[in-house]
Amino acid sequence: MSLPFPPPPEDRTLSPYTGYTRAHWEAAADSLLAAVAPYATADGALYHLPGDRTSWAGKLSDGLEGYARTLLLAAFRRDEKALERYADGLAAGTAGVWPRITDRSQPLVEAASIALALRLTRPLLWDRLDAPVRERAAGWLSDALTAEPWACNWELFPVTVGGFLREIGYEPEAASAAIDRGLDRIEPWYVGEGWYSDGPGRAFDYYNGWAMHLYPVLHAWLEQDPRLLDLYGGRLETHLADYALLFGSDGAPMHQGRSLTYRFATTAPLWLGALTGRTPLKSGETRRLASGALKYFLDRGAVDDRGLLTLGWHGPNEALLQGYSGPASPYWASKAFVGLLLPPDHEAWTAPEQPGPTDRTDAVTPVRPPNWLIQTTTSDGLVRLHNHGSEDVRYDPYYTRLAYSTVTEPSASYDNSVIVGEDPTRTDIEPLGTGEGWVASRHTAGGDARVTSVVLARGAAEVRAHRVTGAAPGTPVRITGWAAGEGARAELLPAVGLLDGPTGLTGTTGDGSTLFVALARLTGEQEPTPLAEMVSVRADGADGIVVTWSGGGGARVRLGDGADPVVEVNGG
């Protein structure tokens, strides 16, 4: 464990997959809290972590972020000594140091962490404050009740602040109005089967777990409101059945979406399900997945030699940051420690670890709301996500590539793309359905061209079919596959309409529409069966293919002029 404190010894009897116990989680929390302490200002109101980077909110806001996100960690840890330091910071911050909460301002985000921490530790922190400090703090937080959020998970920050202020009796009517307004506003973004879009559109990523589910479920749990817990807890329970599929056997979460520098915050909904009893996972499975993710990052340099979380994934990595990423942004990873709210004798801590989905069996699982296909293989522990429904409001390689995995990251050379002409972008993604072993979508590429895509998968093998329309005859088309991965190798073979090229498979469009088909594989196996022996593909007219798997069964795919592709899966 790359932390200043020596880690506890591993327990391979209780935790045969990770060796981690509650003691490891406590040690990690203690180490992270100790490491940030020297970077607090003299009054404790701001935490200025080292580094040249400043978020677009500015240094003052970044310092508040450092205070708020590490306070949340201290709250989950119930660390009374640390909470005393944060009490001093609260007194100073609300005496004029902190920036005010205004419309769509970063302090609104941090107010939610502060309010949640104060609510969780009320007897240890809030109730011990002097009355003038409490009055100032409540007044500072109350601006969150009327500040306008961005139309996304930000709508839940006033909900979280409102829950605390209503509990302490401060402006209860305004607090109730903020709670009702925020919960009402996220409702149109619930797309069913446990999934939210993070705002209007089709933004599907980890914000489902560490924001869209976390805040409403914690609010319902703290309110002890059975109706709300049935509603939001029920959604969480449904979501976790899909969510559990997104972790590789080495603990790695899926490398997709934004704000990935929050790292093991991906485990927060796993623990939340155990905390509320709203989970389809066995207790030992919950801990296996959560501890696996924590260990994955600690073993790979997420914490530097000062004990600080870096801006990146393993170590520092500018490629996956956003403009709002400041030095303390990674400390939203504190959300992972919501599991410490569970008492030490809870089954999630005492039950032996049990295998997660990736440990148990090969699977190709359709996930309807985001229009994804999740492909898992136990021989190498890899998880691959075929994305035929997620996109951000702008072209973003972490949203708009055709596929992601637990061992690869989007490359600068446009992996997993259909490049029409010289344009690698994929916009206006239209989901066309997912089913047994397949997923389909349509998108814009190369200006006016439309690409209809179908992916079929079995084991680690993939068939990728793309029908290009709207491009001038003779337009070059390049198909790329997987980038190189950690301990995994990528393969891409031409099947229909393509030739091998130095940077992918290449072809050209004809009149009307042109069909391009490739075989692909990402595998960690040392000596896998040759890909060409696992699956065969033949053209079936101008717009169809017949797929035959070596183990039996197959599919007939038609990508004609109809609105949707037709995929007929045979047995086997």
Image: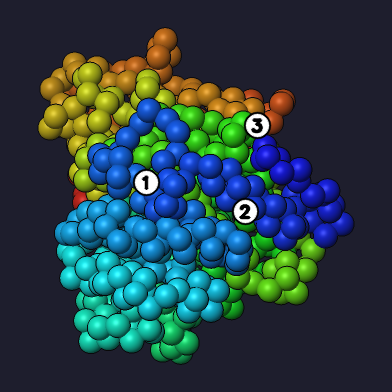
* Label 3: which secondary element: loop
Pick the residue in front: 346 or 469. 346
Q: Please name the residue that numbered disc 3 is placed on.
A: 524
First reached walking from the N terminus: tag 3 or tag 1: 1
The type of residue carrying mark 2 is: Ala
- Mark count: 3
Q: Which of 256 and 569 is in front in this view?
A: 256
Q: Which of marks 2 and 3 is nearer the N terminus?
A: 2
Whether residue 391 is visible to the viewer of this picture, yes or no, is no
Is disc 2 in contact with disc 3, using a CB cutoff of under 8 Å? no
Q: Distance between the residues labelled 2 and 3?
A: 33 Å
Q: Residue at x 16, y 59 (%)?
A: 103
- Which residue is label 2 attached to? 29
The one of 371 and 85 positioned closer to us in this rendering: 85
Between the residue at mark 2 and the residue at mark 1, the CA separation in whole angstroms equals 20 Å
Q: What residue type is labelled 3?
A: Gly
